[in-house]
Image (spheres, rainbow, N blue to C red):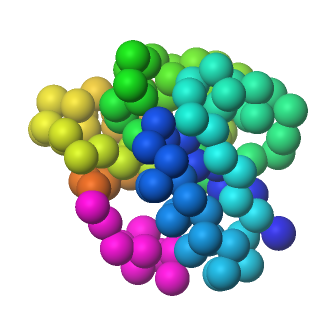
Amino acid sequence: MEKILIIDDEAFIRENVERILTEDGYQALCAASGTEAREIVADEDVDLVLLDLNLGTEDGIEVLKELKILDPELLVIIITGFGSVESAVDALKLGAFHYMKKPFKADACGLS
């Protein structure tokens, strides 16, 4: 079973994406911060990460960099409600697999 890590500071987003993924047969893991996310990636064999660009006081780009150091092959999709062309380009240059604006539908990223 594929493990997907949802990193978002908004509980509503984490819970809804977790529900969708679980219903579709994935194992969903959740983190509200970069610190939690780093611990999970260090301890678990994660297949995909959905990473919010704005994690409260944390910068999702910095979290992306740190996750890629822990696992250079990790697939990371950036999700954000405040996207810009510049942040998308930065994320993709740093190894993000894809970049999506919130709100999004589950089928937009092949999750449903």
Residue 38 vs 76, above or below: the answer is above
Which residue ends up furthest to the left in the rendered image? 85
63 lies left or right of 108: right
Q: Position of residue 95 (x, y in %)?
A: 46, 34
Which segment did they paint magenta?
A: 103-112
- Which secondary structure class fits the magenta region best? loop
Q: Residue 4 lies in what quarter of the image?
A: bottom right
Q: Position of residue 69 (x, y in %)?
A: 64, 20
Closest to the observer, 36 or 4: 36
Q: Residue at x 38, y 25 (%)?
A: 56
Q: Residue 74 lies in what quarter of the image?
A: top right
Q: Residue at x 41, y 79 (%)?
A: 107
Residue 27 vs 101, above or below: the answer is below
110 lies left or right of 48: left
Closest to the observer, 38 or 48: 38
Residue 108 appears in the figure: yes
Q: Is residue 16 magenta?
A: no
Q: Position of residue 68 (x, y in %)?
A: 59, 27
Q: Residue at x 63, y 38 (%)?
A: 31
